[in-house]
Amino acid sequence: MRRFLLICVAASALARPSFAREVDIVITGGTVITMAGPAIENGAVAIEGHNIVGVGKAADIAKKFTGKTTINARGMAVVPGFVNAHTHVPMTLFRGIADDRDLMDWLNNYIFPAEAKNVTREFVKWGTRLAAAEMIRSGTTTFADMYYFESDIARETKAAGLRAVVGETLIDFPAPDNKTWDDAVAYIRKFVKEWKGDRLITPALAPHAPFTVSREHLQQVRKLATELGAPILIHVSETKDELRQVAQRSGGMTPGTYLDSLGFLGDDVVAAHGVWLTPDEIQMFAARKVGVVHCPESNMMLASGIAPIIQLQRAGVDIGLGTDGPAGSNNNLDMVEEMASAARLQKVSRMDPKALSAHEVLEFATIGGARALNLADKIGSLEVGKRADVVIVDFDQAKTEPVYSAESAIVYAASGNSVTTTICDGKILMRDRRVLTVDVPAAIEKAKEYRARVMKSLGK
Ligand SMILES: [Zn+2]
């Protein structure tokens, strides 16, 4: 009997050694795709506080750590949280307001009047809340936003537990929050001071585009960003019409060259789209370390064109992936779909199925976006010391089994709905498909209310 007891004690000590440190969360048993090396089959990730403290084989992690919360990820993939590097989150409340139209009809007859009549602090609050629910549900843990009332967007984002680079829009016409340029500049000074240094929120300046902001104002933004130590988010070279307008105001320059001639470009600039960048501009963006955000679904939906992603990649430009806004240019915030679209668009446009792989688009959606946003020291991969932004993708579904390659299953077979668990900064925001930090039914109810209000405001 005594001998039997000794064996039992020895066996339990083996299973859970006494020197294992107790940490907050251990995710164990899944395929861990770190984006910093080969995938780890039957791997584990240990999280303590806000950070990742262990990544490796499940057996090795079990020797070092036990979790107050243990998440079994058998049959699932454990990946870095997705980075949606270009969006306009409150526009969820305009989702599908005017699809299948020309850009100018869409902008002038729907988006601009709808924004002028409806966008208030309350509107962006509910729009951000709805977007947060959607992003958490589909595995996005970081997003870069360009809109109005960004301080309110930041507050909602933080309440939902998400990470974001929030860019207050500067544009040469009266905006819903700031009626004049000087008001917008004053707002930005206050906004950056309020949020700078926050764990989750990076305040940014978001001049809308080189054709909607004057030369003098672009130069002023550049100076202000340097003074405040805040990044710049901007749309660049999205459509052919933009090329025409920029050429007119710059004596024939293309948007990237024009911005460079103003001393605007630098490693703190994140350019969305870049559809019509020339070979010279691609080299210039690489040299200036400008990040580029590819938005394939928006570019397809608005028929803007096909971004030269392979050339940008070859030049060494940091490339992120973004959904763009959900009002007529996507219309969702699902980064898993966006990855599939990015890969397929390059394949068909180059008539080459090898043009862009599942691994490469997964990179864009994680570490690439983190690099473009200058956050790669904190997020984008599963490595010890980085922030615990971790997502679990369930493969045990009819649409994803069997799994020959985890990366291929995520990109080509799964969707945002395959995500079961979302962790940001060490906090569980969704567990087993239940969103914990946003009242989802309330956000959906409010979205329906706003639909009626918006339609009425447009006289429809
Ligand atoms: Zn955009």
Image (cartoon, rainbow, N blue to C red):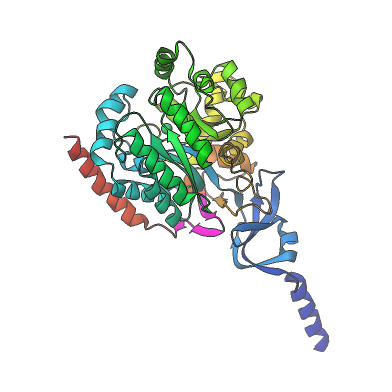
Asked whether the viewer can see residue 297, the reply is no
Residue 24 locus on image (x, y percent): 60, 66
Q: Please, what is the dominant secondary structure of the magenta stretch?
A: strand
* Residue 66, picture quadrant: bottom right
Residue at horizontal 54%, vertical 28%? 344
Point out the residue furthest to the bottom here: 1
**From where the camera sits, is residue 459 visible?**
yes
Residue 425 colored in magenta in the image: yes
In the rendered view, tell whether residue 191 sits above or below residue 426.
Answer: above
Say which of 191 and 307 sits in front: 191
The answer to which image quadrant residue 435 occupies is bottom left
Where does ligand 1 appear, by image quarter?
Answer: top left
Residue segment shown in magenta = 419-435
User: Where the N terminus falls, by quadrant?
Assistant: bottom right
Relative to residue 4, is residue 256 drawn left or right? left
- The image position of residue 136, as x and y in percent, is 47, 51
Question: Residue at position x 34%, y 23% from top?
Answer: 103
Above or below for 202 versus 433: above
Report the residue at 25% width, 36% height from top.
Answer: 116
Look at the picture and state if 306 lies above or below 153. Answer: above
In this picture, residue 60 sits left or right of residue 311 = right
The single residue placed furthest to the right in the displayed view is 3
What is the x, y in percent for residue 85? 51, 38
Asked whether residue 252 is drawn in magenta, I would say: no
